[in-house]
Amino acid sequence: MNDFLRVDLSPDEKTESAALSGKAPEGEIEETMEETGQATTGDDVYSMNSDSENDSGMDVDDTILEALPHADADYRAPIHTLRNYVLSGTRLELLEDLHTWAYDSPSSRSICILNGALGTGKSSIASNFARLLRDNGHLGASFFFVRGVDNLASTKLFFPTLAYQLSHTQNALRPHIVAAVQDYLKLGRAQDIEHQGEHLLRRPLLAAQGQDAPVVIVIDAVDECADDSSDLSTVLRLLLTCVCEVTFPLRILLTSVPERIVDTSLSSHASAVTLRRLSLHNLSRDSINRDIAIFIRDRLSRMSSSKDLAEQPDLADRLALRADGLFVYARAAMDFLHDKQDELEQRLDLILSATPSGLGTLDALYLTILEHVIPPARMEQQPTFRASVQSILGCIPVLRDPISPRTLESLIHIPCKDSLPILHQLRCTILVNRNDLDEPFRPGHATFVQFLLSSARCPNRLYLVDAKRQNAQLAEGCLRVLLTLDRNICRLQDPSMRKADVVDLAERVRTHVPPHAQYACLHWAVHLRGACKVGDAHSVKGCRCGELVDLLKTWATTKMLVWLETLGYLGRLDLAVSGLTAGCDYLGTRHSKTRSALEQGLRLLSDHLHEIEACPDDVYLCGIRQDGYNSDDEELKRPLAQVNRKGKNLKIGLF
C-alpha cells in the first residue's frame, strides 16, 4: 500500500478520532464537544507594540497574523470530531485516486471536485486526506463548512482563514502574507469578499518564488455554505484565478453534494485549468457495502454485549445493506446500539424492522430512534413535556450557532433540569455533553436537520419542526435579552477610550456579555427574518409571533444604540445594517415611529461605521433619541463636532 495511505495518528488525534472508530468509552463523543466555530476577531489580540510582543512571546509577524479575523475551520477543529477518522482498510480506492491527483497530475493547475449525496462520507474522506497531506508537508490550508455554525456556514472569513493557515504551513508564503495582512488591516477588519481574495490570497500566492512541491487546499462541504449564491460563486472564481496564475503546483480539493453553482462557476474556465471529477456514486456498491460492513463490525466488536451477536455472523453485512450506501446510517445505528447496551437486542430488532411505508432507510431509522427514546404516548399525555421536546427539537435545525443548555434557558426559558434529560435522550442524533450545562449541543449530521424540517421525511407531527414558529420563539427570546443590555456594556471606567487602548477588552467582553447575550446580539435578526408574522397561517396554536412587533418597537426606541455599542465591542458591526434592515422588513409599511428609529440607525452606520468601530461609545453622540437612557450630561446634548474627547476634537457630525 502507498506510504501516503499509512495513517499514523498522534495521541491527540487518536482521541479525536476515537468517537467515530468506536474506540471511545461510553459518553466520550458527548464529553469531547467544545464550543466551536468561533472567530478570532482581532479585538481579542494584543496591541501591535513592542511591549505586548515581549509579554506574549509573539514575534512581530505573529502579532500581525493574530490580528487577522479568522475562523476555527481547519479539519482538526473540535467541531469536526465525527469527520476525523476513516477506519483502516476502508476508502482505499478513493484515497489512492486523490493521492494520484495531488502528486502525479500532469497539470500544475488542477482542481478536484468530489461529489456525493449527504451521508456518503465525503467529509470523513476530506478530513483524512487533509491529515495525510499535512503529514507529508503539502497541506496548505483547509476550510470545512458546517451548516448551523455562523463562522463556518459563511464565506465572510473564508479568505482570511486560508491566508492565516497558509502563513503557518508554507514558509515561502509567510512573508508575503504578513505584508498583505498588514496592509489589509489598515482598511479595517471586515472587507468584501473580492478584496479579501485579491489582497490576502491571490497577491501573496503570485509573489511566492522557488516553490516546486505541490500545495493543496482542502475545502469541504461547499453545499453547507449558507451565503447567497453570488458570494459563493465569487469565492470559487477567485480560487480558480489563483490556480490558473500561480507559478507552482497549487491544487484545490472541493467536496460537495452535486451543486450546479460549483459546476457553473468552474466549468466556465475549464480550458484554463484541469478539472478532476470524482463521484462517490461511481464507486461500486459492493465496495461501499464492504467498507460500511467493516465499520459496523468494528463498532459491534467493541460493545460489551456483543458476544450475544456472535451467533449472527452475517449481521454486519445485513446492516450494511440496509444502510443503502450511507455511512451516516451506519454511524447513527451503531450509536443507537452503543447508547444502551442493556437494550442491545431490543434496539437491534427495532433497527432491522424499521421500514415505515414510503420512507428511506435513514429516515426510518431516525423516526425509530425518536419514537423509542421519546415515546409518542408520553408526548400525548404530558403537554408540558411535549412543548419542551418540540422547542428543543426545533432549535436543532434553526439555531445559527451551537448553544449550551444554560444559554437555551436564558433564551427560551426551558430550565436546564428539563432540557438536559431531553438532550441526553437525543444523544444518538445530536452531540451533547450530559454533564456540562455550558457545553454547546448541535446536530450530529445535516441529514437529521433535513429530516426534522420535512413533513415528507418525518411523518409523525410530534417531532416535525415548524421552522417559522421556532424562529419566532427564538427571535422573541433574543429581543427580550437585548432589552436587558445597558450602556457601557463592558463597564469601562472611561467609555470614551478607543478599543485599541483597552488592554483587557477580551476579558471584559467575556465577563459582561455572556453567551446568551452574544447570541442574541448576533442572531436576533436572522431569526426575525425566518419568523412567522401575525396573520400567517399557523398549523398549531400557541405561536407567540404576535409579541414580536411590540418587542421590536420597544427595542428600536430604547435599546438600539446599546445593541450597536455591543456589536462594536464584539467586533461584529458588519451585522448591524442587515439587522436594522430585517427590522424594517418585518414591520412593513406600518409603525412609522419605529421605522424612523431604524432608518436613523441605518444612516448613522452609513456615515460613521468606522468611528463607531474604533470607539463604540461614540454611537451615543449621534442625537438619536432613545427612551431607555436619556442622559442629563450636557456633553451628550451637543453636536458631535463640538465634543472634545481626550483633547481630540471629533470633527464629524452624524446628523
Image (cartoon, grey):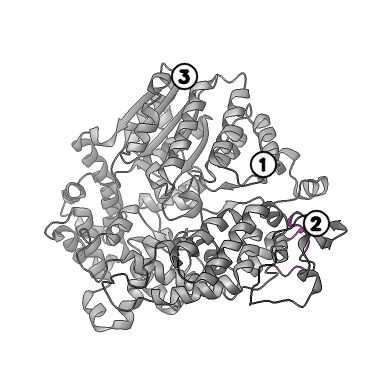
Whether residue 494 is in magenta: the answer is yes
**Can residue 571 be seen by looking at this rendering?**
no
> Picture coordinates of residue 102 (x, y %)?
43, 25
Q: Which residue is mark 3?
A: 108
Q: Amino acid at mark 1?
A: Leu
Q: Secondary structure at mark 3?
A: loop
Q: Main secondary structure of the magenta part?
A: loop
Q: Which residue is mark 1?
A: 65
Rendering quarter of residue 280: top left
Q: Tell me which numbered mark, 3 or 2, is placed earlier along the sequence.
A: 3
Marks 3, 2: nearer the viewer: 2
Q: Observer-nearest residue: 396 or 570?
A: 570
Quarter in which the C terminus is drawn: bottom right
Marks 2, 1: nearer the viewer: 2
Quarter in which the N terminus is drawn: top left
Q: Residues within 10 Å of mark 1 (few under 14, many from 20)?
A: many
Region of the chain picked out in magenta, as a range = 490-504
In the picture as drawn, the residue positioned furthest to the left comes out as 357
- The answer to whether marks 2 and 1 mark residues whose Cβ atoms lie closer than 8 Å is no
Residue for point 50% across, 70% down = 478
Is residue 533 toward the left or the right of residue 15 in the image?
left
Q: Is residue 43 above or below residue 105?
A: below
In the picture as drawn, the residue positioned furthest to the right comes out as 647
**Can residue 286 be seen by looking at this rendering?**
yes
Q: Is residue 224 above or below residue 218?
A: below
Residue for point 20% across, 34% down = 284
Q: Is residue 157 above or below residue 638?
A: above
Label placed on residue 650: 2
Q: Amino acid at mark 2?
A: Leu
Residue for point 44% across, 38% down = 219
Q: Secondary structure at mark 1?
A: helix
> Picture coordinates of residue 329 (x, y %)?
26, 52
